Image: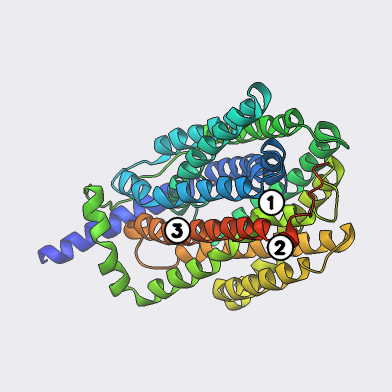
Amino acid sequence: MTHDNQRSRVERRAEKRYQISVQRDLTRNFTAHLLHGMLGQTGFRLLNAPTFLPAFILLISGGSDTAVGAAMALQSFGMMLTPLLGASIIEHREKVLPVGFVTGTAMRLCVLAIAAAGFFLAPGPALAAIFVALLVYGLMQGMQGMQGVIFNFLMSKVIPVSKRGRLTGMRNFLAGIISAIVAFLGGEYFLGDEPTISGYSAIFLLAFVLTSAGLTMLVMMRESVPPRLRKQAPFFRRLREVPQLLRDEPEFARYVLARSIATTGRLAMPFYVLYVARNVRLTGENLALLTIAFTVAATISNLVWGAIADRGGFRNVFLIASGLWVVATMALLGSEHLIPTLVVFASIGAAAQGFQNACVNLTLEFGQRHDLPLRIALANSSSELAGTLGLLAGGVTVLLAVRDPRHQNQEVSLG
């Protein structure tokens, strides 16, 4: 038997033992991921929905659209910086969950800081503290930042591909339903007819509690050790390998480019609710209804996106969701009353969910498992760079529009 054949047999046996351990702990790990995602997404959607946080910053800044754009750009900028660093931190480790606990805790402390700033600081210092908290939150953020790399890679290790669709579908559905209920209660009881800074802060404090409960669910998880790991390499050496990776995988390179271009459209997300405020009062009830429309549509649409993916793949989901996003944004320009605006927000929620699902799953379909952290990081960093530039362009556009005499007399109803 040659040395290569013997090594091949050893590798196959190691892979078999790994797959056996994955199957042995599958029920336990599936449950842990489901509860973590359900509670975590419920809390984070209160922060990430294009309603409560932009309206909160609008109120605390005295009605500054530019402050809203700057805050969201800082969050996106943080999300751009850390994915590649996250990949270099975890790709050589046998177990990555401990790193996930560190970054997950940091994210939740940022949410707590946003709530505390509203409770205890004057508007000026509170706004500065929120800017810092959003930057750090972006550095760690779950879907695209450092924690996104960590937890997507973790899921790929312990949940077989045949079960991931079921897991993400159940997680997103349950989180969406609970988010809608929590958004309604928060808007109705914490904000009311005249939203206050403390009312918004109470909503974000609730988000901190829910996300923290979700993180503790991962204590029950058992992480299997894969048979093959990359050797630890300095961060900048891994960074120099990116061009070669793109040359070796042209299909992946085209996907990264398409995703980055589409992500620039996120520049409008924080400004949707500000545009709505020209025609609809931002009362607690109306903000709750808009958030419910966004989250429920995103939840229910998972069933549609899943069916489309099963029939034609996530590439079709990517294209259809992007098209729906464009149509919904154009429709918002003609929506002057609450009911059509709710329909538009529902369409945006469904499109955003489909786009997110497509991006997460398409990234996992390229290359080999041991190179997965770098590919996740590269795709996330590229799209967040595009998103940051888009948000900055949106802020500049708003600033120029405010200076236009034709727009100077328009007022924003803060509630």
Residue denoted by label 2? 348
Q: From where the camera sits, is residue 169 visible?
A: no
Asked whether disc 3 touches disc 1, contact meaning CB atoms under 8 Å apart, the reply is no
Report the residue that reaches farthest toward the left. 2
* Quarter of the rendering occupied by the C terminus: top right
Q: Which mark is residue 385?
A: 3
Q: Does residue 337 appear left or right of residue 233 in this picture?
A: right
Dot 2 or dot 3: first in sequence order is 2
Report the Cα–Cα distance between label 2 and label 3: 22 Å
Q: Position of residue 348 (x, y in %)?
A: 71, 62
* Quarter of the rendering occupied by the N terminus: bottom left
Q: Residues within 10 Å of mark 1 (few under 14, many from 20)?
A: many
The quadrant in which residue 285 appears is: top right
Dot 1 or dot 2: first in sequence order is 1
Report the Cα–Cα distance between label 1 and label 2: 10 Å
Residue denoted by label 1? 50
Tell me the kind of residue under disc 3. Answer: Leu
For image coordinates 37% across by 58% down, the residue present is 372
Tell me the kind of residue under disc 1. Answer: Pro
Q: Does residue 298 appear left or right of residue 185 in this picture?
A: left
Above or below 325: residue 297 = above
Tell me the kind of residue under disc 2. Answer: Ile
The quadrant in which residue 188 appears is: top right
Asked whether disc 1 touches disc 2, contact meaning CB atoms under 8 Å apart, the reply is yes
For image coordinates 74% across by 28% down, the residue present is 198
Report the Cα–Cα distance between label 3 and label 1: 20 Å
Above or below 388: residue 282 = above
| Label 3 secondary element | helix
Q: Position of residue 411 (x, y in %)?
A: 80, 50
Q: Is residue 73 or residue 370 the one in the foreground?
A: 73
Dot 3 or dot 1: first in sequence order is 1
